[in-house]
Image (cartoon, rainbow, N blue to C red):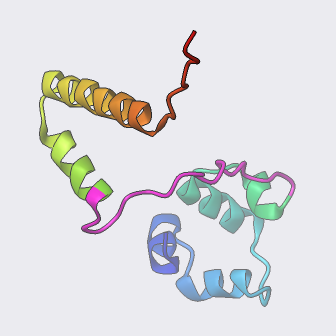
Amino acid sequence: MTQVQLALASGVQQGEITGYENDKRVPTAPKVAALAKALKVPMEVLIGDVEIPQPPASIEPRPHGNSTPALTQRIIQQLTLENQRAVLAHAKALLKAQEAQSTPKRRTKAA
């Protein structure tokens, strides 16, 4: 949310919000309440008594742009659920075949 959006949602002037962010001003209790309501957080979060829990960072990168994973994802999302399941089953079969090809075979001794 931008300062302008927050100002519109809370009724607090954008210049005041800038002052709060830069530690040049201290908001009154009613302004903290208005900002908290607009941000949908408890007032304690804004005054520093409580931290907002952050979701864990994604370990896997998200596909973006015109990369093959991104294009694949967009195409699959357009399929019906039944066809998505069929693609998934086929992808699993391909992965299994790929793993079988890369696994070295054991040689048995001739008796």
Residue 71 percent location from the top left of the image: 22, 56
Q: Which of 3 and 13 is in front in this view?
A: 3
Residue 100 percent location from the top left of the image: 41, 30
Quadrant of res 26: bottom right
Name, please, the residue furthest toward the right. 49
Q: Quadrant of the C terminus?
A: top right
User: Would you place residue 6 above or below residue 59 in this image?
Assistant: below
Residue at image point 49% right, 34% down: 103
Q: In this view, does 83 lie to the left or right of 25?
A: left
User: Would you place residue 55 above or below residue 17 in this image?
Assistant: above
Q: Is residue 87 left or right of residue 13?
A: left
Q: Nearer the viewer, residue 14 or 85?
A: 85
Residue 106 percent location from the top left of the image: 55, 25
Residue at image point 36% right, 34% down: 95
Q: Is residue 83 left or right of residue 20?
A: left
Q: Does the magenta stretch include residue 27?
A: no
User: Would you place residue 18 above or below residue 38 in this image?
Assistant: below
Residue at image point 20% right, 41% down: 76
Q: Is residue 53 magenta?
A: yes
Q: What secondary structure is the stretch in magenta mostly built from?
A: loop
Residue at image point 63% right, 80% down: 17
How many marks overall?
Answer: 0
Quadrant of res 83: top left
Q: Give the range drawn in magenta.
A: 49-68
Name, please, the residue furthest toward the top. 111
Residue 94 percent location from the top left of the image: 29, 33
Q: Nearer the viewer, residue 66 or 28?
A: 66
